[in-house]
Amino acid sequence: MILRQSKMPVMIILIWIFSLSLPAQDNQSAKMVSCFDRKLSSGQDSSVVLTEEQLIAMALMNSYKLQSMQTNIDIAEYRYRSSGRLDNPELRYRDISLSEREKKYKDQQIGLRFSIPKPGELKEERQGSKVRLWDKKVDKERYQQKLAARIRRDVADIIMYDQLLDLAAKRVAIEDRRIEIVEKMVEIGQRSVVYFTKAKMWHAESKNDYARAKQYRIQARSKLSKHTGVDPDVAIMWPEIPEISCDLADLITIALQNRPEIERLNQRIELAGYQNRLERLKVLPWFNYIEMNYHFEREQRVDWLELMMGISIPLLDWNHGNRQATDLAIRKKELEYNALRETIGDEVSMAYEIYQNLLLDWENFQRDAQELISEATTVVTQAHAHNTLLPDEVLEMELTIVDTQKLLAQKRRNLTHAFIDLQYSVGTEEFKLPANPETDGLP
């Protein structure tokens, strides 16, 4: 008993200390919850309306990968500027002897030694640096076009999901009215309980569709916000429905002019030519170095200039295999060039075919859908005015209008995506033919 009484103050103190720590834990928990529940916002006014071009500019500006690629281009540019240069001469100081008596330099020789590059070596080195520079440029340009295409797709998705969310809300409202109407019709014997059960099922399905549409909209806007840094709820101006007037042959011509991979391969072909010439010139005797020396002998009081040089003499033709290899390398690059042109043509053809099919589908469905919506709206208006249809049949017509508008939104998004893919395959945003294809880089 005495032990239990002695422990009571200790227990009270421990409970008091524990109770003091509880508010701090609650505050920390609240802080964590607020961090996760915080609405993503960049501080922009959600009432601002942004265009597609503005969103693309923001995404390009905020891309760390593009900044890294630009840094790689700058590095390659500096290396290209320093390539293909003669090496600095080598200063030589030798033939020095120290007199034991006078402790002075008796003989001395000083000179400069120049390393002579092989014929064509500097051009080959400089062209190699240029190829590496073009590799960086092409990677950045294609990624930039890919990022812009991604933003355009996000905008098209957001436009569609905004429409689908509004249409899903309309459908829920219609299904709410249907439940009330059918329930009353069941009471007076105009509809069966089976129809009422189906109406409840349709009502539940409409609420699920609304929840999914809301979730898809949030995901699409969060995706755009991640790349651009804008507020997820920012208003976006609708771009025009894309349409082009060029035929497939024109698009392939434009692609062969604008796709940066063509110029990169041209640079590699030129490099292969320099490498071939370098190997062929190795059969000629050539200087390895040239050295000029000044020699002074104190005792004999004489000095002179001397010229030394080393010459490589290819008595044995061990380089025959390298010449054949570089001949094949040139042929290989030419084959790669033709293959690249063919690949680009196939990419454009496939994207163009998909775009044309979706464009035809959009034009036909849009025309028929507008007629259907107009006729259904007229029927609904007359039914409300003259009671020509049962109330639930009127709701069916309203649901038909909603479903048609939903299909229109989806087909518009699909057509826009197809146009974006075609644009990326062509490698430009402006479908404009070159003034003279024969002199504008097109063989």
Image (cartoon, rainbow, N blue to C red):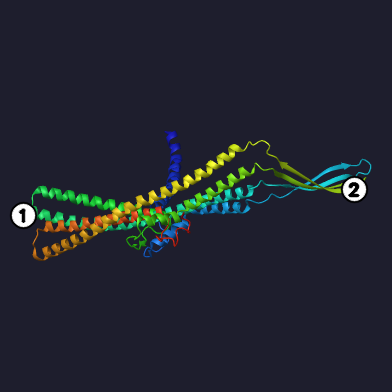
Picture mark count: 2
- Image location (x, y in percent) of residue 192: 8, 49
**Residue 302 has which mark?**
2
User: Residue at point 63% right, 49% down?
Assistant: 122
Label 2 and label 1: CA atoms lie apart by 135 Å
Quadrant in the rendering for residue 162: bottom left
Quadrant in the rendering for residue 54: bottom left
81 relative to 369 in the view: left or right: right
> Is residue 23 at least partly visible in the picture?
no
Front-most of residues 245 and 333? 333
**Residue 241 has which mark?**
none
Q: Residues within 10 Å of mark 2 (few under 14, many from 20)?
A: few
Identified by mark 2, the residue type is Val
Outermost left residue: 189
Q: Residues within 10 Å of mark 1 (few under 14, many from 20)?
A: few
> Is residue 388 at least partly visible in the picture?
yes
Element type where label 2 sits in the image: strand
Location of residue 62 with respect to 6 vertically, above or below: below
Outermost right residue: 101
Task: Name the residue tied to disc 1.
Answer: 188
User: Residue at point 43% right, 49% down?
Assistant: 341
For discs 2 and 1, the disc positioned in front in the rendered view: 2
- Image location (x, y in percent) of residue 293: 81, 47
Mark 2 or mark 1, earlier in chain: 1
Where's the N terminus, which quadrant?
top left
- Image location (x, y in percent) of residue 124: 60, 48
Front-most of residues 196 and 227? 227
Element type where label 1 sits in the image: loop
270 relative to 10 in the view: left or right: right
Identified by mark 1, the residue type is Ile
User: Residue at point 53% right, 41% down?
Assistant: 328
